[in-house]
């Protein structure tokens, strides 16, 4: 498996695990982010969506869908911007930025791997 696929596979598994946490123990994640959980259904819907997105990442990694890999670098890199703004404007815990940092790291890993594979002629 090429490194770009590994990076997307790892990220897919990560968001599936985060989704499971939101599904079963959302109060823990919300508490870590300095947020008060008032609607468990919304948190569990978020968990479901994260698990579904994770499934797409895993399947794309297994199929070596480099177009998908490239597209994900755009949105994953932007996550830290949104989460930082949410932290500043909504007064959420700065810990929420850690999730954005993980997204940014994953996007950079995928981007670098795609670039290296392209230079090596591994299309």
Image (cartoon, helix red, strand yellow):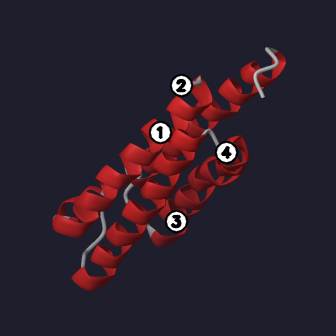
Q: Secondary structure at mark 4?
A: helix
Image position of 9 with respect to 99: above or below: above
Task: Please indicate whether residue 81 sits to the left or right of residue 49 in the image.
Answer: right
Residue lying at 67% horizontally and 50% vertically, measured from the top left = 68
User: Pointers 2 and 3 in contact (CB under 8 A)?
Assistant: no
User: Pointers 2 and 1 in contact (CB under 8 A)?
Assistant: yes
Q: Nearer the viewer, residue 6 or 19?
A: 6
Q: CA distance from mark 3 to mark 1?
A: 27 Å
**Picture quadrant where residue 16 is located:** bottom left
Q: Secondary structure at mark 1?
A: helix
* Whole-percent x, y for residue 40 in the image: 23, 81
Q: CA distance from mark 4 to mark 1?
A: 13 Å
Q: Which mark is residue 9?
A: 1
Residue lying at 61% horizontally and 30% vertically, measured from the top left = 4
Q: CA distance from mark 3 to mark 4?
A: 21 Å
* Whole-percent x, y for residue 122 in the image: 76, 22
Q: Which residue is mark 4?
A: 73
Q: Secondary structure at mark 2?
A: loop
Q: Is residue 39 visible?
A: no
Residue lying at 53% horizontally and 62% vertically, measured from the top left = 88
Q: Which residue is mark 2?
A: 1
Q: Which residue is mark 3?
A: 86
Q: CA distance from mark 2 to mark 1?
A: 10 Å
Q: Nearer the viewer, mark 4 or mark 1?
A: 1
Q: Mark 3 or mark 1: name the one nearer the start of the chain.
A: 1
Image position of 66 with respect to 78: above or below: above
**Picture quadrant where residue 63 is located:** top right
Q: CA distance from mark 2 to mark 4?
A: 19 Å
Q: Residues within 10 Å of mark 4 (few under 14, many from 20)?
A: many
């Amino acid at each position: 498996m090429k490194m770009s696929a590994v990076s997307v596979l790892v990220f897919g598994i990560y968001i599936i695990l985060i989704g499971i946490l939101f599904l079963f123990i959302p109060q823990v994640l919300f508490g870590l982010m300095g947020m008060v959980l008032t609607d468990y259904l919304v948190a569990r819907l978020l968990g479901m969506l994260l698990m579904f997105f994770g499934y797409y990442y895993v399947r794309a990694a297994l199929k070596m869908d480099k177009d998908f890999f490239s597209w994900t670098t755009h949105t994953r890199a932007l996550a830290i911007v949104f989460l930082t703004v949410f932290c500043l404007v909504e007064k959420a815990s700065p810990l929420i930025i850690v999730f954005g940092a993980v997204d940014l790291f994953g996007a950079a890993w995928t981007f670098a791997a795609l670039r290296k594979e392209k230079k090596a002629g591994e299309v």
